[in-house]
Image: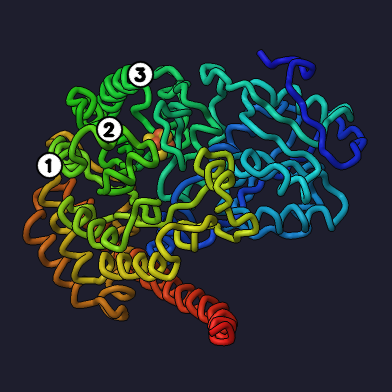
Amino acid sequence: MPLPITLLRVVRNEQPSVAFPPLGKNLKVLLVWPKFPSSFWGFEGVLTMMQEGAISPPLGLITVAALCPSTWTLRLLDHSFDAINDADLNWADLVMVSAMHAQRTDALAILRRARTLGRTRTFIGGPWASSEPDVVQLEADHVMVGEAEEVFSAIALALENGTAQSRYLVTDKPDLSASPIPRFDLLRMDKYTSMSVQFSRGCPFQCDFCDIITIYGRKVRGKSSAQLITELDRLRELGWHGEVFIVDDNFIGNRKNSLELCKDLAVWGQARGQPFSFYTQASVDLADRAELMQAMVAANFMYVFLGIESPSPEALKGSKKFQNLRKDSLDQVRIIQQNGLWVLAGFIVGFDSDDQTIFERQREFIERAAIAWAMAGMLQAAPTTPLFDRMKAEGRLIEDSEAISNFSAPNFRTVMPLPALLHGLSRLLADLYEPGAYFQRALRSLEVWQPRPGQKPTDTTSMAYNLRLLASSIWTQGVKSGYRRGYWNFLATLLRRYRRSPAKLWMGFSLLLSAHHFLLYSRQVADELERDCAADLEIANAAAVPELISQAGDS
Ligand code: SF4
């Protein structure tokens, strides 16, 4: 039941308020998902060998689409692979954009272009608009901060009748039991390697660098398992087979609910010949929940992302990541792998307690844990987080920082000298993704992973598709690449050791294909970090010269 608009806490734009004319009941709406720049988890290198154009679809946007009145005509463009022409923008009465922080450059460009054409109204929501509304408001007519479920129908009515505000600040956290089935039918499903669903929002922990808890809260709000299964049924009806990403930032934030879902999913999947395999994100204390891990495996979860962040207890303590301090993270990873879930993980450098030994400690941890897909990135102080507030209070925040990624200089002054931090991360990435190191670690990740017999990758694609992909991989990686020797050695070992283990063979091929992303992307990032390091040293030296001259004068 939507709240009446008067119950929303609405904040007007600081600029003089604008009167927006009514758009009427029969709006034509263009939903736009901006482009991501190349990123560690974007797998762009793999996508160059495939016919798909992106890894996962814009789930938030298609959820908002399901909240739109039935009288509206909706079209969706994913700028990862769809062109956006002036004719598309001119067709629309309203252009609705959703974006994450990483998409901000393209999001602003799209909003600006739509505004310049002068015909269409623009609206933006989503995680980036929620964390930096003042920035997006410069280019958009309407900005929504917060979650849409309980308020969007009132906002839609205001757009129709001409009473819409320039900014909506939605402070209430919606009950997800009222969240509609996303409009999966708007997607070009064949352009994605996996589909996405969401079971819960929020996380009970308090990591000080995390904006999930400042945006979605520490109280976990979830759907019922029946509700999520209805969404999966819808995906099946639309013909989807294959991987499904459960996008929750911490799938086990409410362990009781996730256990119940997994048990129901196992029954549902077995009755339908396991149409989907799943992956998700979880905190490392998953290792303490044997029943939950077994239920996830029975439900056909294949792998899980863990936020390990650092082998340094001081860094974990300083960032309030207490859940990672309770036990040895290396043991926790091994328990999860041995219980049937292949592990990928995120790591961070740049904490105040980090010294120059941290890079080797991170590398050693990742190697010992056999985490083939390990993202080691830079700490950033995201707006709204306690870390951001602390850096501001300590006068260390770099307000005009252009930091937009996990691989740029932090947006705050670090304790470790910046050149040392940039160089250290560059070396860490270069070492982790040196072809020999990567392929050896990939093989060890398969050795330590113990999938259960019932666990199987879903048969998603035709033989013709697989042969085309293999041919493309052989040509791109096995013939033309600079790491072809490692490619052939890995492939030969994979076929020799695991030809009778469908799960390991499938994961092994994913590791083989993904080499073309991780090896090239990491090298590019490592080179950029070295360039930033050299530039920073140059600035430091230039600043030091007048100081030296003045010191010489003093003496
Ligand atoms: S466990 Fe993950 S989602 Fe939860 S607060 Fe920490 S970083 Fe954020």
Query: Mark 1 — residue?
Result: 450
Q: Is residue 318 left or right of residue 112?
A: left
Q: Nearer the viewer, residue 296 or 243?
A: 296
Mark before the other along the chain sequence, 3 or 2: 3
> What is the three-letter code of the residue carrying label 3?
Asn
Q: Quadrant of residue 487?
A: bottom left
Q: Nearer the viewer, mark 1 or mark 2?
A: 1
Within 8 Å: ligand 1 and the Cβ of disc 3? no
266 vs 55, left or right, is: left
Q: Amino acid at mark 2?
A: Gln
Question: Within 8 Å of ligand 1, the CB of disc 1?
Answer: no
Does residue 28 appear left or right of residue 489 in this picture? right
Residue underneath mark 2: 274
Q: Quadrant of ligand 1?
A: top left
Q: Residue at 42% across / 75% down in the picture?
A: 530
Residue 547 position, x and y percent, is 56, 79
Badge 1 or badge 2: first in the primary sequence = 2
